Amino acid sequence: MKLYIVENYDELSKKAAEVIAEEIKIKNDIVLGLATGSTPEGMYAELVKMHDNGEIDFSNASTFNLDEYYGLDDEHEQSYHYFMNKHLLKKINIDSKKTNIPSGCTDDVEKVCKEYDEKIEASGGIDLQLLGIGMNGHIGFNEPGNYFVGETHIVNLTEDTLDANARFFETLDDVPKKAITMGMKSILNSKKILLIASGSGKADAMYMALRGPITPKVPASILQLHQNLIVIVDNEAGAKL
Ligand code: PGA
C-alpha cells in the first residue's frame, strides 16, 4: 500500500487528480472505475481543469461507476448519473457511449447487474478504481454485513448510510432505501485502486479499514488484500493511521 497523508482537502484533490492523470497519460484507452460523493468533487474539478488545459485527453477512455440509487431516474438531481454528468462527464471529451453507470430505474435488477459485470469483464477489467469510504466502512454501496458480495447487486442501505446521505435530500424519508452497487470482485480485480478520504468523520473508518481485521463488517478492510492500493487522506482522515 502507498499511503499519502496530505495537509487538507485541496491537497487531497490535487494529489488524487495527479494520480489519475498519470494513469491516463500512460494508457489513453484506460478503463476508469469512478465514484461519487462529496469527497471526489474537488478531484473532478482538478481533472476538468487539466482537461481544459490540454494536459489530459479522455477521448479513448471508458468509465464504470460504482453505484446508483435504486428507483431514481437518470435526470433526478440526486442520482449518480446526474452527479457524474455535472462534475465530470459533460465537461470532458469522453465518448458518452463509453461511460457506464448502473441503471437505478429497472424492473429487471438481476439483468442490469449481470450485464454490468459482463461489460466490465468485456472491457478487460478496470485499470484504476477510485473509491471513497463511508463512515461505516462501506465502499461503493457494499454495506457492512456478514459476508462479502462479489457481483454487482442490489443492497438495502443501512441506517448509517441513509443518515449520512440525508444531507443531499429534503428529508430523510426522501433518501432511496436501496441501491445497485458493483461488488467486491470487480473492485478487487481492478489493476490499481485509489482510496480517498477527507475529514475527521472518516478517521475511524480509515483506521478500521487499513489497520483492523479484514471483515465484511468493515467492507473497505478487504482492500488490505489488494496488491496495488494507493491511499490519499488529509490530516484529519489520516489522524489514526
Ligand atoms: P462522501 O461519501 O464522499 O460523500 O463522504 C463517501 C462514501 O459514502 O463512499
Image (spheres, helix red, strand yellow):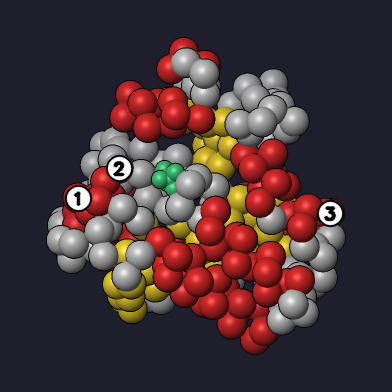
Q: Which structural element holds mark 3?
A: helix
Residue type, mark 1 in image: Asp
Residue positioned 82% across, 65% down in the render: 93
- Mark 2 vs ligand 1: CB under 8 Å? yes
Q: Is residue 184 left or right of residue 134?
A: right
Task: Check residue 97 in the rendering and tell me which mark sits there, or answer none.
Answer: 3
- Seen at 25% across and 51% down, the residue is 200
| For residue 180, above or below residue 101 | above
What is the total number of numbered labels drawn onto the structure image? Answer: 3
Q: Quadrant of the N terminus?
A: bottom left
| Any part of residue 185 in sight | no
202 left or right of 162 in image: left
Q: Which mark is residue 135?
A: 2
Residue in the foreground of this view, choosing between 26 and 18 = 18
Comparing 140 with 42, the one in front is 42
Q: Disc 1 designates what residue?
A: 204
The amino acid marked with disc number 3 is Lys
Q: Amino acid at mark 2?
A: Met
In this view, the residue in front, 121 or 224, is 224
Q: Position of residue 211 (x, y in %)?
A: 17, 62
Q: Are marks 2 and 1 in contact (CB under 8 Å)?
A: yes
